[in-house]
Amino acid sequence: MSLTPQEIEEQIRARWRLPVPPTCPKCGYNLTGLPTNRCPECGRPFTWTDIERRASQVWVHLLLLRDANRHVRSGLRFAGGGLAVTFAAYVLGVRGLLGAVVDLVGFLLAMVSLILGWQALTAARLPPWARELVPDKPNLGIGVVTILLALTLAAAAGFFLTR
């Protein structure tokens, strides 16, 4: 026996288990307990499948942001350490295979730092109601500094690699 799309929608609505409420993608209205598939606030039609997918994405972002400040600070340390080692190798005139390894490690640290620094900026992708659920708000200033330091390290490692 197969289910109709309407029966699937009703099952999704009945078994809502995500810790975030179902909200309208357009206006953010809480759709909990709504008997129809149209937002009463803005009038936008929706499917419960789309609402569940969106709520799942918000929940994943909230879980990632839980430790965002710790990750951003780690990225800052990686970028700063990589930049120090890369410049030290350049000043000391390290060449050949060792120089290439230092530059490659510096470039990899830059990429990791860039990813970790970017986590602070992902809070802007959350709907306003979901930002309130983040216990420790990501520090955007440290995130931007980490990203800039990571880009500097990537440029330095690329520049020194061509020497």
Image (cartoon, rainbow, N blue to C red):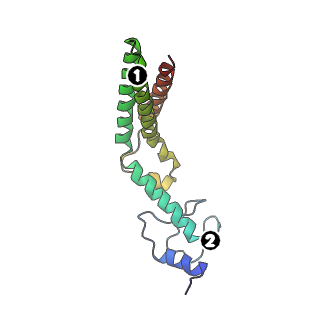
Mark sitting earlier along the chain (1/2):
2
Residue reaching furthest to the front: 97
Q: Amino acid at mark 2?
A: Arg
Please give the name of the residue rendered at 44% of the width and 58% of the height, measured from the top-left corner: 59
Label of residue 16 in the image = none
Classify mark 1: residues with Cα within 10 Å, few (<14), some (14-19) or many (20+): few
* Residue 43 image position (x, y, % from top left): 65, 67
Give the number of marks.
2
Relative to 117, residue 154 above or below:
above
Residues marked 1 and 2 touching at CB (< 8 Å): no
| Residue at mark 1 | 97
Q: Secondary structure beneath disc 2?
A: loop
- In three-dimensional space, the C-alpha distance between marks 1 and 2, rounded to whole angstroms, equals 64 Å
* Residue 84 image position (x, y, % from top left): 37, 21
Front-most of residues 121 and 131: 121
Q: Secondary structure beneath disc 1?
A: helix
* Residue 30 is at least partly visible in this image: no
Front-most of residues 135 and 41: 135
Please give the name of the residue rendered at 42% of the width and 39% of the height, measured from the top-left corner: 116
* Residue 44 image position (x, y, % from top left): 65, 66
| Residue at mark 2 | 38
Q: Amino acid at mark 1?
A: Leu
Q: Is residue 24 left or right of residue 106?
A: right
* Residue 18 is at least partly visible in this image: yes
Q: In what quadrant of the picture does the N terminus appear?
A: bottom right
In the picture, residue 146 is in which quadrant?
top left
